[in-house]
Image: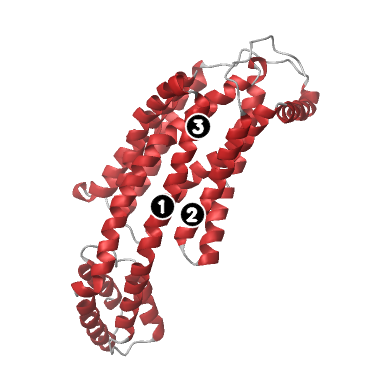
Amino acid sequence: MNRVSAYGYAMGYLGGSTIPFLISIGLILFGRFIGVNGTLAVKISVILTVLWWLGFSLPLLRNVHQTHYINIPKSKLVQNAFTNLRHTISAIIHDRKLLFFMIAYFFYIDGVGTVISMSTSYGSTLGLSSSLMILALLMTQLLAVPFSILFGRLSERWGTHRMLQGGVLVYMLICLLGFYLGFSLEPHQKAYENGFSQAVSQSGAHLDQQTLDSIKKSGISILSDADRVNAFDKQINVITNTRSNEERIELEKLRTKVDVFLSDPTRSKDYTDAIRFSTALFWILAVLVSTCQGGIQALSRAFFAKMIPANRSNEFFGFYDIFGKFAAVIGPALYAFSAAATGRSSFGILSLLLIFAIGFASLTLSKVHFQPQPSTEVEEL
């Protein structure tokens, strides 16, 4: 069962996301060479994704039909649904092994989802290149295919329970490294941003405060660029096109002063070195995520399937799926609260350790015996 689940996730990563993702990245990064600008490339990518999923859903919708079910009068459908839900919850509560696993799954799968969904936001906050993060996500998708299969095979030797615990420990390491990535970069980032703001304020240009604030805000976004001088000049050109001749003269004065700051290697050395180190560490984190992302999802599904009654699998898996969906709000909320409370995104990543620690502790308490439930006839509830 572990191997089947692992192959399912591996093929899902390959066909369900990697191929359309690869095409979309190609359009976004290189579409300009065939006359497709960035905005159009994003729109095409969305349409492509919709058509891709629709196309591969049609064979399932047309050829797969439910053959096992319980005939219930329509008047009792709602009542029966709530009755089944109550029985399922009761069964989980009274099975301590299953209960502890569901608690563990609730927390660690939320952490896994948060790492996936917040990685680019975290990187953007730290000023990492958007192209870098897109390519890192692509690598994560590609490596998730063989590592999902490897996870399934290793579970046959080391056991599903141990592999799940190992996956959670790897994610805890990811949180620690992610925290260090941001914690080591943020002071240099803040210092260089402050220097840039001072350069704008002290340029001697006679511009209104709103314009100066706008230049500071937009300029901070390009400070991590390799050619930050050229990027800043492009921003000033956009502003200049809408201003009067007097304001253009002042903007040119500001451009000259700020370009001196941006082109000074002694002022940017610490920040540039920190960006290079963080970029390398981001790639390492992407590899670590890919080693466990698919495997922990695949084995969780197989692990759960071995603990539940085969004749009630639909009910339990429905609960399993909804349980995971409800968990998806805790991680992002904890990340946002910690980042807002401390003023540093790195502490947002560090806070996810709590989620994985609870998941690891609950997995340890579950002490599940890997014995599949015998198949029985469908019982009517």
Query: Does the CB distance between marks 3 and 1 fall below 8 Å?
Result: no
Identified at 58% across, 34% down, the residue is 363
Q: Quadrant of residue 89?
A: top right
The residue singled out by tag 3 in the image is 164
Number of callouts in the render?
3
> Of the residues under marks 2 and 1, which one precedes in the sequence?
1
The residue singled out by tag 2 in the image is 350
Which x, y percent locates residue 168? 49, 38
> Of the residues under marks 2 and 3, which one precedes in the sequence?
3
The residue singled out by tag 1 in the image is 178
- Front in this rendered view, residue 289 or 140: 289
Which x, y percent locates residue 86? 77, 30
Q: Can residue 126 be seen in this view?
A: no
> Of the residues under marks 3 and 1, which one precedes in the sequence?
3
Q: In which quarter of the image is residue 78?
A: top right
Amino acid under disc 1:
Gly
- Would residue 319 appear left or right of 294 to someone viewing this image? right
Query: Does the CB distance between marks 2 and 3 fall below 8 Å?
Result: no
- Would residue 135 appear left or right of 162 to someone viewing this image? left
- Would residue 168 appear left or right of 40 to someone viewing this image? right
Amino acid under disc 2:
Leu
